[in-house]
Amino acid sequence: MNVRAAIAYAALITLVVVGLYAYATLPASIPTSFGFDGRPAAWGPKLTVLLLPAIGVFAFVLISVVQTVKPRANLPFYVSDDRVDAVQAVVYAGTADLKTVLMCGLLALTVASIANSGGTLSPVFLPVVIAVVGAVILVVAYILVRAWRAASA
């Protein structure tokens, strides 16, 4: 197991543990959305705190399955027969990075969401959301560019 995979697994396990701990300790009703003034606009059951860890587990499994697929059919450019193995190596490494970024991002979002559970919008929530979305977009773009270069070589 390489360092990227170890970090992804550690972030996934931490994400699940943090979600379960939060579920055990939060009040029965938590804010699920906030208005422009920073006050809760809607409340829901504390079960919603487990949504991000559930998404994380699903995404982790899905990306792990995608890593095993030959990249000819799921890329927006042509990959010749002689370049499939090179492109697959790039896609495999890139999706390992994507798992790491996604798990760490979902962990940060879960922690920020838990900080909001007291009824006050945490000032770090929006920057965390923007950073996570931006990081995922950058990693996907990086994977596509590296795979295209490997296919074109």
Image (cartoon, rainbow, N blue to C red):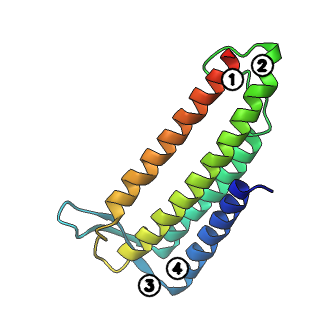
Looking at the rendering, in which quadrant would you find the N terminus?
bottom right
Q: Are marks 3 and 2 in contact (CB under 8 Å)?
A: no
Choose the circle earlier in sequence order: 1 or 4: 4
Q: Which residue is mark 3?
A: 27
Disc 3 and disc 4: Cα gap in Å?
9 Å
The disc label shown at residue 22, or none: 4
Q: Are marks 1 and 2 in contact (CB under 8 Å)?
A: yes
Describe residue 113's horizontal placement relative to residue 42 as left or right: right
Q: Which residue is mark 2?
A: 83
Disc 1 and disc 4: Cα gap in Å?
44 Å
Q: Residue 92: percent from the left, percent from the top?
A: 73, 39
Choose the circle earlier in sequence order: 3 or 2: 3
Relative height, residue 80 to residue 112 (above, below):
above
Looking at the rendering, in which quadrant would you find the C terminus?
top right
Mark toward the viewer: 3 or 2: 2
Q: Which residue is mark 1?
A: 150
Q: Quadrant of residue 80?
A: top right
Mark toward the viewer: 2 or 4: 2
Q: Residue at (76%, 55%) from the top-left corner?
A: 2
Q: Residue at (48%, 40%) from the top-left corner?
A: 137
Mark 2 neighbour density, 10 Å: few (under 14) some (14–19) many (20 or more): some
Question: What secondary structure is marked by label 4?
Answer: helix
Q: Are marks 1 and 4 in contact (CB under 8 Å)?
A: no
Choose the circle earlier in sequence order: 1 or 2: 2
Q: Residue furthest front?
A: 153
Mark 1 neighbour density, 10 Å: few (under 14) some (14–19) many (20 or more): some
Choose the circle earlier in sequence order: 3 or 4: 4
The three-letter amino acid code for the residue at tag 4 is Ala
Q: Residue 150: percent from the left, percent from the top?
A: 69, 23
Q: Residue 88: percent from the left, percent from the top?
A: 76, 31
Describe residue 38's horizontal placement relative to residue 49 as left or right: left
